[in-house]
Image: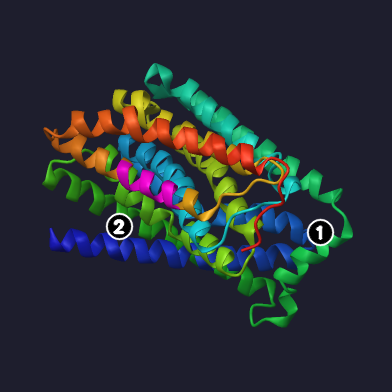
Amino acid sequence: MLTHSLLFLLGLATLTLGAEILVRGASRLALTLGISPLVVGLTVVAFGTSAPEMAVSVDAAINGSGDLVIGNVVGSNIANVLLILGLSALIVPLAVHEQVIRQEIPIMIGASVLLVVLASDGSLSAGEGALLFALVLVYTGFLVVQSRRAGQAVRDEFAAEMPAAGSRWDAHWAVQLLLVVVGLGLLVLGADWLVDAAVAVARALGVGDLVIGLTIVAVGTSMPEIATSLVAAWRGERDIAVGNVVGSNVFNILACLGLAGLLADGGIAVSETARNFDLWVMLAVALACLAIAIPGRAIVRWEGAVFVAYYAAYVAYLVLAAQRHESLPAFSGAMLGYVLPLTVIALVIGLVRANGAPPPRG
């Protein structure tokens, strides 16, 4: 057990390092080749933080661990919204410019709905995986076209955040390409270690792959998103804190599950538990992001605390369900009968009060 735990931590560290190297190398290489800094920011950097999810999902799919694939993606998306946005809102209220989120949040919700529909028959076939992956290509192409119409001010903003490659030690394209190759290699290696360790620990503890994927692996592969959003929130970059989460969720569904479905032998099986509960939780938390898509509206600190508390409750539910604990019915009843309705009422009151009010500044 100790060996597997150490292997898990080593795999997680390798994944994080690989993602950082990959993002740096790809970003510099893109700029060297003359690609718009805006495109780099919206694609390479945003999607790069989801590289660990991609590596783990593909590795698990190839090894026939379908529950780990679904658990990793669905669990990461739930953690991104409830845990990461919640913690970010505790640092600073999250008010995002309307132009930034008016298309990204609906796209994230649409991708979540599509996944629920495709998984309703109990599997994701190779054809459905191809559909998801084709959609991420279309989405990326759309961002490229949109960026060409962006104003000079937007381009200058991204250029300021990502200085020209010539001012860095990695100015030469050969060094940048080497960073990309090394980053990819570390991602593959780290994913293999993490998946092997997670499956071994799950079997030793009698816990299913789905629960491990929804919790430990999901949070572990979300570390780049956690670091990016929390640092952005601390610096007051609220658009980055929210945009990183929303963009990563779209990539997780379309690219990670799409490629995993293409490579899995016979597709990816989706368990009844995931279909009846976890996928719907993922969709619900995506819809919760609509609270910040209203002009003049923000996720304030108390709502951030509610998000974090809900994530803790969700993890507690998974643990109790895995153990078939006798307190599970009472816990579920309390959440469904009291806590959720009270929260909905409080959010509605907050939306009404915020109507027409300027977003908070601190």
Highlighted range, magenta:
305-313
Q: Earlier in the sequence, mark 2 or mark 1?
A: 1
Residue at image x 37%, y 53%? 219
Dominant SS in magenta? helix
The three-letter code of the residue at mark 1 reads Val
Please tell me the numbered disc located at residue 285.
none
Query: In the rendering, at what x and y percent does residue 236 appear?
Result: 63, 66
From the viewer's perspective, is residue 252 above or below residue 36?
Answer: above
What residue sits right under mark 1 in the picture?
154
Few, some or many C-alpha atoms within 10 Å of disc 1 (few <14, some 14-19, many ≥20)? few
Q: Secondary structure at mark 2?
A: helix
Nearer-the-camera pick, 261 or 320: 320
In space, the residues marked 2 and 1 are separated at their CA atoms by 40 Å
What residue sits right under mark 2 in the picture?
193
From the viewer's perspective, is residue 333 above or below residue 309?
Answer: above
Query: Could you say which quadrant of the image residue 266 lies in?
Result: top left
Circle 2 or circle 1, nearest the eye: 1
